[in-house]
Image (spheres, rainbow, N blue to C red):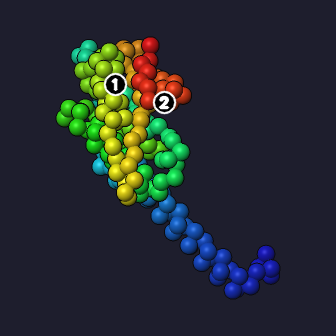
Amino acid sequence: HLGTLTQQDISIAETLGEQAGTLIEQFRTSEMMQGGVLLDYATGSMNRTGFDMRMREEFARAVDYQVPLTVCLVRIDTSRALSDLSNEQSQHILSHVLNLVKAQLRDYDVIAHLGENLLAIGLIGYNSQQAQMWTENIRGKIASSIIEVDGRRFSVTVSIGVAEATPRDSSETLFANALQVLGRSEKLTNKVTVFA
């Protein structure tokens, strides 16, 4: 009703509406931009969107050409010493682990940082046995390397889940299988588990 609102109340409501509309538009634009980004800014490797896109392509290629494809999920094991670190120090440890993994990858393999100290790796042309040997090698290298952060020395371990693509899978079920066995590895820590 016109009598219940003053002209000043109407002016304030219009201003609030315009501000809210602007904020919603900025939020949607930010969501669109983040959805289109394929790289993780902090690590320079792919993010989840980029990894999923690339693995769908590689999965289709693996099925068409009957080439093995394996997904490996690598998570840095948590410990009391690591939980006391700052975000910057934790990022330094993640970068160290990421560099060790990247040094063992071929140019056409896929690697992504999915957050929460989780890396995803797509090994093209590797069956689960070959991937298990590769990941055991990586696990050993990471566990035996020393990381120095602000004068403190650390060694970390990783848990790894490995799943090989089969023709009845999809790229989504392949990832889910790797995630399932990663959970088993994390319960034991410093372990590689292969989906069977």
Q: Quadrant of the C terminus?
A: top left
Q: Amino acid at mark 2?
A: Thr
**Which residue does the image show at 47% across and 37% down from the upper left?**
77
- Tally of marks: 2
Numbered tag placed on residue 189 in the rendering: 2
Dot 1 amino acid type: Glu
Q: In this rendering, would 191 be left or right of 138?
A: right
Q: Earlier in the sequence, mark 2 or mark 1?
A: 1
Q: Quadrant of the N terminus?
A: bottom right
Element assignment for label 1: helix
Verify CB contact (< 8 Å) between mark 2 and mark 1: no
Find the residue positioned furthest to the left.
107
Residue at point 49% right, 60% down? 27
Residue 31, picture quadrant: bottom left
x 44%, y 21%: residue: 193
Residue at mark 1? 136
Q: Secondary structure at mark 2?
A: loop
